[in-house]
């Protein structure tokens, strides 16, 4: 309902129906309760954040603690600022309830004109003695009530526009940036056997501390042969008889 609306374009009956339709102040009361709940929740958040900062100062020190506190402090300030905005919204809803209630109370009911319009002779004789006809009296009351109805709507629209222009302001919460130390990764390739072992399947290097450095052959230098079972014993080769 913008301010400066041309209410003269509406009849008294239309204005009376408009201001009295809808839930009225009850709708603003529901909004008030919701904003009051938002304000209370933000106040609790602000209190918990500040308490957390104070507790961390007593038991947490160092650069990481300072960084955490520097991140929590803006959040607490934002919560307090948002709580103030919610409180302004609650007050605005309360004011709007008062405005609509006053407009409904001030809005006069339409005054009908039921008398028959007099003729020129009857009107002239009545005016001659300084009187008014019944029609003229009713018409005067009708016009006064209609004018008052337009004034009520104009006042209500102006008050509403002023109330809307002062609604609570809300801003985006600050972004938290959490940094951690770089994770050191083990870049060793593969997973080896026991320390000192450089083995291959057959004929590879033996144990680093074994006796023998030979390459190739079957177990040269005491090398470990993965194809030889652990329980297999070594027996000397039998010589074939010469023919």
Image (cartoon, rainbow, N blue to C red):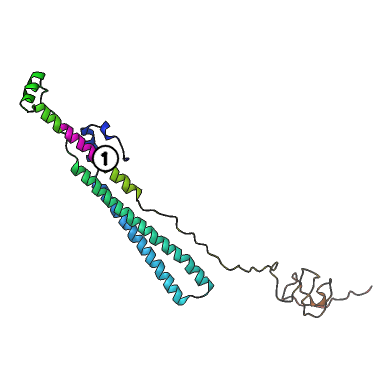
Residue 53 visible in this rendered orientation of the protein: yes
In this rendering, is residue 157 above or below 201? above
Q: Which residues are magenta?
A: 142-151
Quarter of the figure that contains the C terminus: bottom right
Q: Residue 14 at x, y = what percent?
A: 23, 33
In this rendering, is residue 28 above or below 10? below
Task: Report helix, strand or loop for mark 1.
Answer: helix
Report which quarter residue 179 is drawn in: bottom right
Q: Residue 191 at x, y = what percent?
A: 68, 69
Q: Assess whether residue 150 is covered by the magenta stretch.
A: yes
Q: Assess whether residue 73 is covered by the magenta stretch.
A: no
| 64 horizontally vs 96: left or right | right
Q: Please name the residue that numbered disc 1 is placed on.
A: 154
Local packing at callout 1 (Cα closer than 10 Å; few below 14, some 14-19, many 20+) is: many
| 225 horizontally vs 25: left or right | right
Quarter of the figure that contains the N terminus: top left
Please give the name of the residue rendered at 35% of the width and 64% of the height, measured from the top-left corner.
44
Judge by depth and name the residue closer to the eye, 186 or 218. Answer: 186
Report which quarter residue 150 is drawn in: top left
Judge by depth and name the residue closer to the eye, 205 or 92. Answer: 92
Please give the name of the residue rendered at 88% of the width and 76% of the height, measured from the top-left corner.
239
Magenta segment, prevailing SS (helix, strand or loop): helix
Please give the name of the residue rendered at 35% of the width and 63% of the height, measured from the top-left corner.
43
Residue 114 visible in this rendered orientation of the protein: no
| 188 horizontally vs 32: left or right | right
Q: Residue 105 at x, y = what percent?
A: 18, 44
């Amino acid at each position: 309902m913008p301010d400066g609306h041309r209410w003269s374009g509406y009849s008294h009956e239309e204005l009376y129906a408009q201001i009295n339709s809808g839930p009225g102040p009850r709708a603003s009361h529901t909004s008030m309760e919701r904003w009051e709940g938002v304000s209370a929740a933000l106040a609790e958040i602000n209190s918990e954040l500040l308490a957390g900062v104070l507790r961390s100062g007593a038991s947490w020190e160092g650069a990481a603690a300072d960084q955490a506190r520097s991140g929590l402090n803006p959040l607490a300030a934002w919560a307090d600022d948002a709580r103030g905005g919610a409180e302004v919204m609650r007050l605005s809803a309360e004011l709007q309830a008062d405005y609509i209630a006053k407009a409904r109370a001030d809005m006069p009911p339409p005054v009908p004109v039921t008398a028959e319009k007099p003729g020129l002779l009857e009107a002239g004789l009545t005016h001659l003695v300084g009187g008014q006809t019944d029609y003229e009296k009713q018409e005067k009351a009708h016009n006064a009530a209609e004018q008052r109805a337009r004034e009520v709507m104009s006042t209500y629209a102006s008050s509403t526009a002023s109330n809307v222009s002062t609604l609570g302001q809300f801003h985006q919460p600050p972004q938290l940036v959490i940094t951690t130390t770089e994770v050191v990764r083990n870049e060793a390739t593969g997973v080896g056997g026991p320390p000192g072992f450089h083995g291959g399947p057959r004929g590879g290097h033996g144990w680093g501390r074994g006796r023998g450095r030979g390459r190739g052959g079957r177990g040269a230098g005491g090398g470990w042969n993965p194809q030889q079972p652990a329980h297999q014993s070594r027996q000397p080769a039998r010589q074939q008889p010469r023919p």
